[in-house]
Amino acid sequence: MTTDALTRLSAAVARHASGDGAHETPVPELLLARRSVPSDFEAVTYAASLCVVAQGVKEVRLAGEAFRYDPAQWLLVSVDVPATARVVEASPSRPCLAVRVTLDPAVVNELLSGGTPPMRPGPSARALGVERADPPLLDAVTRLVTLLDTPADVPALAPLVLREITYRVLTGPHGPRLRQISAAGAPAHRVARAVRWLTEHFAEPLRVPDLARYVGMSPSALHMHFKSVTTLSPLQYQKRLRLQEARRLMLGQGLDAAEASFRVGYESPSQFGREYRRMFGESPRRDVAALRVEAQPT
């Protein structure tokens, strides 16, 4: 990877992410982020995506496993996962500049059906993985970000570049991790179906045997492969989704802890409070109050 290529990508991100925080773009699949100081771990749910640091260092943790990446190594997320993330290296003169490109499963499946070699059966790999960044993929990501300089070109060209990025991921060092999720009948593909169901129904009661039947696996096989991919059991995964959504509801909609807990599927506010404290380190009221203070402009 050349310094010039990274310089172009960093400059493009900086042009369209002038202030700290996350920045949505006219390309719905493209999110830019800037951070001028290191941060503490924050809860975040990643969709299937390619995460690129153009400048700085980031770290993601999933159930105790750490994934650190910088401009030489990028993060691929193959299924939706609730994780925590932080900026490790950043300063006002050299902020952390990051790009997240959401990958469309329909495009993945279309490319696979067009001739990409199928995956051989094997152990299910983690949903998160750090691999070396390769120049063709860097070039495609840079072209996607620089498209923002010419908004009139976005509708026609962005879908083409997004398709190229997906192709580069599938055929590069990240490929096996993504292909296993889309290989029909593979355990990881069944896990991906289970993840989608949980994401869409996290507030509903969960019976693992019913979920296993839905994806065509035995309960024991679902538990083993689900944990292999996400590092969590289905019940732990559901709990994290519920707690992160409750936090969002309290912070964004002003719900109190009891109302938020019922909204996400808890029957006992006291149980919700205990599990919330274990995940976020504070009671719901104190945690949300601290987040509101942090969000205030200085």
Image (cartoon, grey):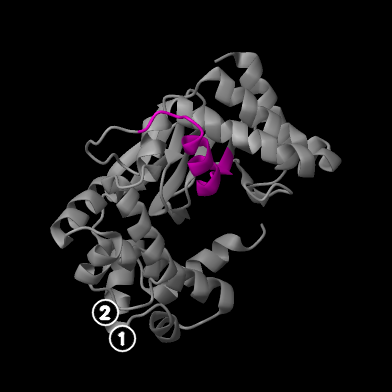
Are there few (<14), some (14-19), or many (20+) residues within 10 Å of tag 2?
A: few
Residue appearing at x 58%, y 20% in the figure: 136
Question: Magenta part of the protein: which range?
Answer: 99-118
Quick check: 105 left or right of 11? left
Give, as a three-letter code, the residue at label 2.
Gln
Residue 249 sits above or below residue 66 on the image: below
Query: Which of the two discs, 2 and 1, sits closer to the camera?
Result: 1
Whether residues under marks 2 and 1 lie with C-beta atoms below 8 angstroms apart, the answer is yes
The part of the image, by quadrant, that contains residue 2 is top right
Separation of residues labelled 2 and 1 (CA atoms): 8 Å
Of all residues, the one furthest to the front in this rendering is 114
State whether residue 29 appears in this view.
yes
Q: Position of residue 139 (x, y in %)?
A: 63, 23
Q: Which residue is mark 1?
A: 267
* Residue located at (58% from left, 32% from top): 165
* Residue on which the image places disc 2: 271
